[in-house]
Every structure is written in structure tokens, then in C-alpha cells.
Image (cartoon, grey):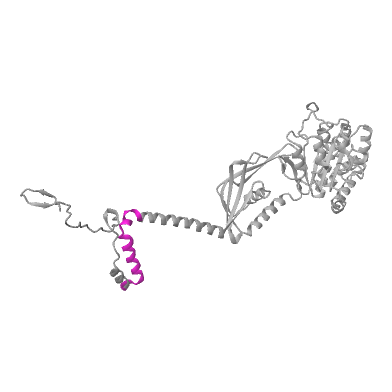
């Protein structure tokens, strides 16, 4: 056997680290130890004796407090930042819970009603709120009504309505938050004004008050128009009131030749009650009237009086409008407000031939075929009464005079002897002899006299029939100025 030796300082022989004469001995391998916590500390073990003492002294609450102190407060991980992480997570969860809870409460306890500016009830509500006393408003807008009277006088009325912002009202014991918002990006293309909404918010249990409030606003709006005729004009693709509603004109205030107004009135009333008859026979339920005659003979005045007699409004459409197209004309005629007469004045000025040129003094986006289709085409409206007026019926194309487009034609001519006498007696009641004398003098002039001329003479001499008799010669000049 061989042995390895190394020589040392005192000549002693020392065995090397390896020897074949004896088996090698190895150190036992220790199991891996988990890495210590922050700053080299291990989590403290639970002290069950303290838990027992806490249970004996304070019961279950004592155990909970002692356990929280040992596990959380004495935990080095909590002290090193883990506790802050847990605390932040808890706060985030709590915030999310509060948001969801508030949303749930809002959905269960509150209710909203949105009124867009394109809805009819929008202006009704603003007008109602401007006159409502139990409201708190810090944001107001002004609406100015400018009225020019026939005598040239001008009257202006200012109305302060709720402006954009928040308002609070108390309606029948319930508080309502009113929020008027104006969009900075969306515009109403018909008027160029920003798109607006009004939102009403109240308790869910008071939601039935919304219907009562809107009904009250509608009643107030219609009451302001009661006994009056509303004149509508086209504004973009919709009809809008033009000026203030006019006081209804009585049918007796318009004096036509014998039997004319009575026959027209009878025909219109018969049409209005014949809807079922038309539908049963598959006939389009619409009727067109043409009133023709010289200027100043009372055509438009009669239509206004007829509307008052029927309790209808009037929609005036100008066919010579530059921005009016076939599509827009069709849309307007199919969306006429309820209980309204459609009036197309001076239709000969818009279309006297099938072509239109700048030299004719007009230029419209509406074509002649577009007008014919709007009157009785496939897309034409139902349940409409259309009145057309013209001073020159001979200029009208035969196509527009066809039945279905114009069903009733009547001449409204210059004043007859009957009309002159009736008008004189209307201005000067009881003056029968002077009326006959006035008729005789007017006949001697041997010139056509319009009802507009007679009205001007009688208005100038309101309470003096003798002066009217003495000034009968002025009727020779159609445009005489008093």
C-alpha cells in the first residue's frame, strides 16, 4: 500500500487530505432555509398564550384584536410596505363600491326626462317655466318679440326664459332639478342655432308629475292662441309660426258677390266630413281650390276668414323661394300641421310656363313637374286642403288646372253693385238711402272698382258717410292715396 506524506516544521509526519487506508467521511446536507424577511427578520410566530389571555379577558373581540396585532402590526412585511399596498387596494375597492352604490341608488331613486330642442314641447316648456313662480334661476336668456303693426307702429316684448345651466323648481310639492345644456358641436341646420336639451330630474316616486307638467305647458301655449289664427311659413324642412297669432277674422267681415263665400264654405265643410267616403272608394282625400281675379278683390282676405270660421291655421308656401327644391316641397306638403290650410299665393308668378328663366323675374329650385307631383303624385299628402290664388289664370299651364290638382275654381272679381252697397252698410250701419246713392255714383264712374279701394275710402271716412259720398270720384284712380 502506498501512503502520501508531507514534511512539516518539526519533522512530524501528517496524513494528507486523502488516504486510501480509510473511507471518506462527508458532512450531512442541510435542507434549504427560506430567505429571511426584510432586514433579515423572520415573521414572528403566533403566541397562543396571549390569545388565550385575550379570550379570557375580552372574549372573541379580544382574540380578534390580539390576532390583528400579532399578524399585521408585528409583521415585518407589513412594516416594509406590504401594508400600504393592502391599504391602497382596500381604498380603491371601497371607492369603486361607493360609485356603484351611488349609481344604483340614482337608478332606483331618481328619474330623468330629456326634452330635445327639436321637440314641439321644448318651447312650450321654456315658456311655461318663464312664467312659473316657484323656481330658482341664476341663468337667464332673453327672447324678444318684435311686432310691426299695420299702421307702422312697432311694439317690442321681452321674455326672460331659463338660460343654459341648472335651475330648481318646486312643482306640486316635488323638487325638480332643471338642466338646460347647449351643444358646442351640434347645430340645428334649419336655423343655425346650437342643438339644446332640457333635462328634468326628480324622485322616481314623483315621475307621474312629468306628464302633468307637460300637459300644463301645452295648455298654456294653446290658450295663448285661442281665438286666433296661426300663420306658418316654411323654415328649412319644417313649418314654424310666423309672427304672433292673428285674431280670427269673421266670415262676415269679407263681402264677396252674392252666394260665392256661402258656396265655398259649404263645399269645404262637405269635404271635411266626407273622409270615409273618399277612403271607401280609394280616392285621395284632398281638395284643391283656385281663387282667381284682379288684385285687391279679397282673395287672401277670404281665405283668412275661412280659416277663422273653420278654426284652422294657414301654411303659406312661397314657390319662388330660391332654396326650395322638389324634395323639400314634397316634405313640407306631407308634414303640414294639423288643422291647417295650405296657401300657394300668386301661383302664376312661380310657373306660367313649363320652363323658368332669370329673364322672367324669378328663379326657383322647384320644377314644374315637381309641383305637379307634390299636388297629386304618389308621394303627395293626404287630408289636405290647398288654396291657390292668381291674378292671371290665363297664364297657368293646363296641366295644373286638371281635376285632382284643382277641384274648385271661382272668380273673385271687382266689386259689384251688391258688394258696394253691403260694404257701405257695414261701415255706416243703417244708412240705407246713402248706400243706394253711393252705389249710383260709383256706377256712373264706369270704371272697375276693387274692394280694396272701397275699404281705403271708408276707413279714411270712418264716421262720416257724407264725406265718403263726396269723395266717390277718387275711385277712378286705383292707387289713390288719401
User: Residue 100: in sight, yes or no?
Assistant: yes
Identified at 84% across, 34% down, the residue is: 348
Name the residue furthest left: 10
- Against 360, residue 296 (above or below) is below
Q: Quarter holding the C terminus?
A: top right
Say if the magenta span includes residue 284.
no
Return the residue nearer the eye: 108 or 320. 108
User: Residue 462: in sight, yes or no?
Assistant: no
Magenta-drawn stretch, dominant element (helix, strand or loop): helix
State the count of labels.
0
The reply, left or right, for residue 48 in relation to residue 372 is: left
Q: Quarter-wise, where is residue 236 in the image? A: top right
Which residues lie in the magenta part? 56-82
Return the residue nearer the eye: 44 or 435. 44
* Residue 116 at x, y percent in the picture: 64, 48
* Residue 266 at x, y percent in the picture: 88, 49
Identified at 64% across, 46% down, the residue is: 117
* Residue 200 at x, y percent in the picture: 60, 53
The reply, left or right, for residue 2 in relation to residue 74 is: left
Say if the magenta span includes residue 61.
yes
Name the residue furthest top: 359
* Residue 73 at x, y percent in the picture: 32, 60
Identified at 59% across, 62% down, the residue is: 205
Q: Quarter-wise, where is residue 196 in the image? A: top right
- Against 42, residue 229 (above or below) is above
Name the residue furthest bottom: 56
Identified at 85% across, 54% down, the residue is: 276
Return the residue nearer the eye: 416 or 49. 49
Amino acid at each position: 500500500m502506498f501512503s502520501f506524506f508531507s514534511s512539516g516544521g518539526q519533522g512530524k509526519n501528517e496524513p494528507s487530505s486523502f488516504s486510501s487506508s480509510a473511507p471518506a467521511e462527508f458532512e450531512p446536507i442541510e435542507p434549504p432555509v427560506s430567505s429571511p424577511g426584510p432586514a433579515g427578520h423572520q415573521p414572528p410566530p403566533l403566541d397562543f398564550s396571549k390569545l388565550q389571555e385575550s379570550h379570557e379577558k375580552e372574549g372573541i373581540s379580544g382574540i380578534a384584536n390580539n390576532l390583528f396585532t400579532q399578524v399585521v402590526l408585528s409583521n415585518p412585511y407589513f412594516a416594509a410596505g406590504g401594508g400600504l399596498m393592502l391599504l391602497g387596494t382596500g381604498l380603491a375597492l371601497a371607492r369603486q363600491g361607493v360609485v356603484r352604490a351611488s349609481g344604483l341608488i340614482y337608478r332606483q331613486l331618481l328619474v330623468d326626462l330629456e326634452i330635445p330642442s327639436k321637440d314641439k314641447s321644448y318651447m312650450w316648456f321654456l315658456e311655461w317655466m318663464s312664467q312659473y313662480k316657484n323656481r330658482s334661476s341664476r341663468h337667464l336668456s332673453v327672447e324678444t318679440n318684435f311686432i310691426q303693426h299695420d299702421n307702422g307702429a312697432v311694439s317690442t316684448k321681452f321674455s326672460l326664459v331659463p338660460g343654459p345651466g341648472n335651475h330648481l323648481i318646486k312643482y306640486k310639492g316635488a323638487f325638480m332639478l332643471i338642466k338646460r345644456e347647449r351643444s358646442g358641436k351640434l347645430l340645428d341646420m334649419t336655423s343655425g342655432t346650437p342643438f339644446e336639451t332640457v333635462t328634468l330630474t326628480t324622485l322616481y316616486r314623483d315621475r307621474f308629475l312629468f306628464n302633468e307638467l307637460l300637459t300644463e305647458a301645452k295648455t298654456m301655449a294653446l290658450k295663448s292662441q285661442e281665438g286666433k289664427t296661426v300663420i306658418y311659413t316654411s323654415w328649412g324642412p319644417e313649418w314654424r309660426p310666423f309672427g304672433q297669432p292673428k285674431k280670427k277674422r269673421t266670415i262676415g267681415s269679407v263681402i264677396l258677390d252674392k252666394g260665392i263665400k256661402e258656396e265655398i264654405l259649404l263645399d269645404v265643410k262637405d269635404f271635411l266630413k266626407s273622409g270615409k267616403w273618399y277612403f271607401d272608394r280609394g280616392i285621395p282625400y284632398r281638395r284643391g281650390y283656385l281663387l282667381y281675379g284682379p288684385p285687391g278683390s279679397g282673395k287672401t282676405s277670404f281665405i283668412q276668414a275661412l280659416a277663422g270660421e273653420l278654426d284652422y291655421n294657414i301654411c303659406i308656401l312661397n314657390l319662388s323661394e330660391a332654396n326650395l327644391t322638389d324634395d323639400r316641397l314634397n316634405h313640407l306638403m306631407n308634414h303640414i300641421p294639423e288643422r291647417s290650410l295650405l296657401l300657394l299665393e300668386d301661383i302664376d308668378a312661380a310657373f306660367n310656363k313649363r320652363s323658368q328663366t332669370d329673364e322672367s323675374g324669378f328663379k326657383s329650385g322647384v320644377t314644374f313637374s315637381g309641383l305637379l307631383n307634390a299636388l297629386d303624385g304618389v308621394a303627395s299628402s293626404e287630408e289636405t286642403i290647398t288654396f291657390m290664388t292668381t291674378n292671371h289664370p290665363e297664364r297657368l299651364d293646363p296641366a295644373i288646372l286638371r281635376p285632382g290638382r284643382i277641384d274648385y275654381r271661382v272668380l273673385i272679381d271687382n266689386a259689384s253693385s251688391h258688394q258696394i252697397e253691403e260694404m257701405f252698410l257695414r261701415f255706416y250701419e243703417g244708412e240705407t238711402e246713402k248706400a243706394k246713392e253711393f252705389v249710383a255714383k260709383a256706377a256712373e264712374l264706369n270704371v272697375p272698382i276693387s274692394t280694396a279701394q272701397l275699404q281705403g275710402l271708408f276707413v279714411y271716412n270712418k264716421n262720416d258717410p257724407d264725406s265718403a259720398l263726396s269723395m266717390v270720384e277718387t275711385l277712378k284712380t286705383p292707387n289713390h292715396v288719401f
